[in-house]
Image: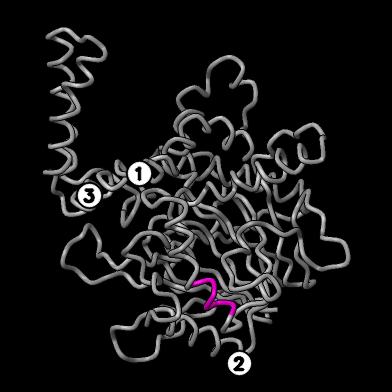
Amino acid sequence: MKAAVLSDTHLGDQDSKLAEGAQSPWYHELRRVIKVRTGGEPLDYLILSGDILDFSIASFEDACKAARPFFQALQSDKLAWQIVYIPGNHDKHVWDAVEWETRIIRKMKRYDDPLPFRRTQPALLDLLNERFELTNVHKVAGTDRWGSLFLEGLFKNKEHSLPINIAYPNLYVKTAKDNYLITHGHMLETAWVLLSEAFGDVKGLKELKPLSLGHLEEFNVPLTAMICTGVGQAGELSKICYEVEQEAKHHEAGRLREVLDKGIPGLARIFKLNFFKRFALRCLSNWVVTLVKEGSASSRYDKQFFTRSLVLERVLTFYHASCDQAKEMFDLDPPRKMIFGHTHEPHPVDAPYPPIESSDGSVLPTMYNTGGWLNKTKDGGDGPEMDPLVFFFDDDGELTSERISVRAGQPSGQGEVTR
C-alpha cells in the first residue's frame, strides 16, 4: 500500500497555490511527483492533514467553490483511491458538521434521540496489514465505504466520487518499522487550549487530569467555536476583516486603525462608558495597532515555536493523550514519529525538528512538518517562498518526503529515507 500526506492548502484563501485546481502549475507538479512515486497508479490513501479548506475569512460557500477544482482534479487524474481528511483550525467546521450530521440530524430525522458529540474520531491506517479503521463508524451495507458524507459533493459526480474519511484530530499509521501520529497541530497553540490551561486547576477540571484528547477538545469549545470560522461568515464585515488581515501581513494597520476609530465610540455609547473607561479602551486599541505594526506573535513561520516552555508543555500533554488514545482504541505502542502542519515551516525526513526534551524526562517523537501552500512569503516580506512538502509511505514501510517547487524549473528532489 502507498499513502501520501500533505496539509495547509488553504482553499478559500486567494493566496493558495492550488486555488486554480488543475490549471495551477503547483497542482501539475504535485500530480507529477505522486505519479512518479506510484508508477502511474493511484495512491491507496491521500491524507489531507488540516487547513485544506479555509473558512477563517472565506464564507462556507466561497471556500467550497474554491476547493472544487482541486478535488475534481484529484478525481479526474485518479491520484488516490481514498482520502483521509483531518480537519485543522481553519476547517474545523468540517468536523463540527460531521458531528451534527451523524449525532443529531440523522438521529432526529428517524425520530430518535440525538447522541452526545464524540469530540474526537481517531483513525488507523495499518499499512502493515493493509487495512483502514474508523472508530465508532459503520461501513455502508454492501460497500467498502465508511459512510457517505457531504464533502464528497466536492467531486464532479456521485458515481465516481472518492471516499472521504474524516478523522479528528489524529490519524495513526502503522508500518513494519514504526507507528506514526499524523495531526494538524493546532492543539499546540495557545488559542486552541487556552481555556483548559487557564481553568485547568478549577475544582471539577483538575480531578480529570491527565486530560484526554476529548477533554482538550470539549473544554475549549466556547473559544475555538468562535475563532475558527465565525469571521468568515459575517458578510460585508468579513471583507473588512480580510483587508485588515492582508495589511497585518505587511505590518500595516491603516484599515485596522480606521475600524477602531469608528468602533470605539460606538462601544462607548452602547455600554455608557465614562471618561476613564473610554480612555482605557483607547489605550487598548493603540496597543493592538502597535502590536500589528511590530508583528504579532504567531506559530506560522515561527522557527522558535518549539523553544517556548508553554509550547513544550502542550506537546507533552497532547502527545501523552495521543499515546493513551492509540493504545486504548487500536492497541498501538506509542508513536515514535509525528507529522503535522499548521506552522508552514517545512521539515523533511532528512531535517526533522531538533530533539525536544520534556520536563519529566519523557521521550517525545521525532517531528516533521509538511509546510504550507500559500503564495505569500514569510511575514509578507521579500524573501524566498517556502515550498511545501509531501510525505510518502511506500510499500516497504519507509517514510520519505519530497519538496514541491515550480520556480526552479527542475524536477523536485527526493527526500532521504527515514531510518
Residues rendered magenta in the picture: 70-75
The image quarter in which residue 264 lies:
top left
Q: Are marks 3 and 2 in contact (CB under 8 Å)?
A: no
Q: Residue flagged by tag 1: what amino acid is it? A: Gly
The image quarter in which residue 14 lies:
bottom left
Q: CA distance from mark 1 to mark 3?
A: 13 Å
Q: Which residue is mark 1?
A: 235
Disc 1: CA contacts within 10 A as few (<14), some (14-19) or many (>=20): few
Q: Main secondary structure of the magenta part?
A: helix
Residue 365 image point, x, y percent: 55, 56
Secondary-structure class at tag 2 = loop
Q: Which residue is mark 2?
A: 39
Q: Residue flagged by tag 3: what amino acid is it? A: Glu
Q: Considering only order in the chain, which callout, 3 or 1, is on the residue closer to the N terminus?
A: 1
Figure check: 102 above or below 180: above
Disc 3: CA contacts within 10 A as few (<14), some (14-19) or many (>=20): some
Q: Considering only order in the chain, which callout, 2 or 3, is on the residue closer to the N terminus?
A: 2
Q: Furthest-right residue in view?
A: 142
Mark 1 vs mark 3, foreground winner is 1
Q: Considering only order in the chain, which callout, 1 or 2, is on the residue closer to the N terminus?
A: 2
Secondary-structure class at tag 3 = helix
Q: Which mark is residue 243?
A: 3
